Amino acid sequence: MRILLFNITFLVFSISLTGQHNAYFSKCDWENVKLDKNYKPSPSDTCMVFASVRGCEESEKIFMGYDCDKTKSIHYFRIYFSGSRWTCVPVKNLTEALNGFNEIKATVFVEGFGFTFLTALDRATLMARQYGLLVVMFDWPTYRPDKKSSYNYKTTVRESAEVAIPFASFIDSLSNHKKSHPESLKSVSLLMHSMGNLLMMNAIQGGHIKNSDTLFSSIIMNAACVPQKDHHVWVEKMNIQKKLYITRNNRDRILNGAKLISGFAKQLGQQPKKPYAKNALYLDFSRVLDREHNYFLYPGVLRDHPYIKPLYSVILKGEEPDFSNENRYIKKPKKNAIEIFDLAEAQKGGIGISVGR
């Protein structure tokens, strides 16, 4: 019975995750992605920077693999999106990737479980288009189409400890670039979504991050798929940011599935408990969301809740939100929390029941 329950839970969890690796741009496939070292971008192109630890074979049409580079090396690209096509320009290092930018507001984006290079590329493009920022994507393999979901999940959890090392190296490189090229980046934020937060957790716990400078204007630990128990121990060691935000949605169906799969361990992005991290502000979306997991990016959620995108936009651009509006925010000092509140919806009798996203 216990094995049957686990299998059913994992099946539901896997079906839910399918929505995560469906592309938002329907033509995001290898027919529309190419590598071109000599590409001359147009001013209208959407530019992104990728730092990927995937295996890379530049001579192949499908040049980015589903597994980690055996040496855990980071492969850097400038990627340009125009129309329905993506052009990847390989560069030697992060400084070359960021060369030429001046007073740019950038956000480092780390995705979670269920992504190939193509779907990570798709999400980075949507992020750039939604928020008007330079997206610097730290890309790591978390989905292999020929493997079962259970294999992918276990491999992602296991490899997150190994990938945390190049992730920390990437952060150090970004810090060094910012110090040596102060005119390049006006602000840098970091958004880690879902299991992407495993990289920071393992990097902190493993002592891999050597930099102690204030690199990020803000860090968002979004819908964090990491154990909430004793999270304050490692979260309070994060000292490379001015502001730290941890988001929460009590109904998050993905995190509820992760809780069951991990032996009923409560997840940080769903049910953070005391002791709270003193250096973090918890943003609680439970009053306004149903079962959504991708509420920072999914177009339908942002359309249904038009006040969510401006909140993220302010934080990602290195600014501090104004939480003084009592019709929108409820302060919970004992929980280090701000509850996002929709007065108009509440007057109707609560949130509507909708399909979780």
Image: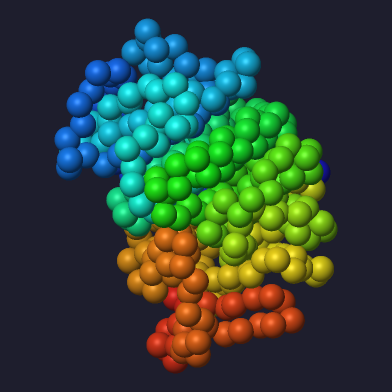
Residue 62 left/right relative to 209: left
Looking at the picture, how far across and down is residue 134, in whole percent?
A: 37, 47
Q: Nearer the viewer, residue 69 or 182?
A: 182
Q: Which quadrant does the N terminus fall into? A: top right
40 vs 289, nearest the viewer: 40
Task: Please tell me whether residue 185 is drawn above or below residue 7 in the rendered image.
Answer: below
Residue 314 visible, this angle = yes
133 or 14, which is in the foreground? Answer: 133
How is the protein colored in the picture? rainbow
Is 77 on the left-hand or right-hand side of 233? left
Name the spot of residue 331 as percent of width and height, x first. Answer: 61, 84
On screen, residue 128 above or below 296: above
Quarter residue 278 falls in = bottom right
Residue drawn at (62%, 15%) of the image: 70
Q: Position of residue 126 (x, y in %)?
A: 34, 47
Residue at x 47%, y 84% (from the top left corner): 328
Is residue 220 something one can see in this rendering? no
Image location of residue 101, percent across then percent down = 34, 42
> How many numbered discs sit on the rendered protein?
0
With respect to residue 296, does 166 lie above or below? Answer: above
Residue pictured at 26% horizontal, 36% vertical: 81
Q: Residue at x 44, y 12 (%)?
A: 57
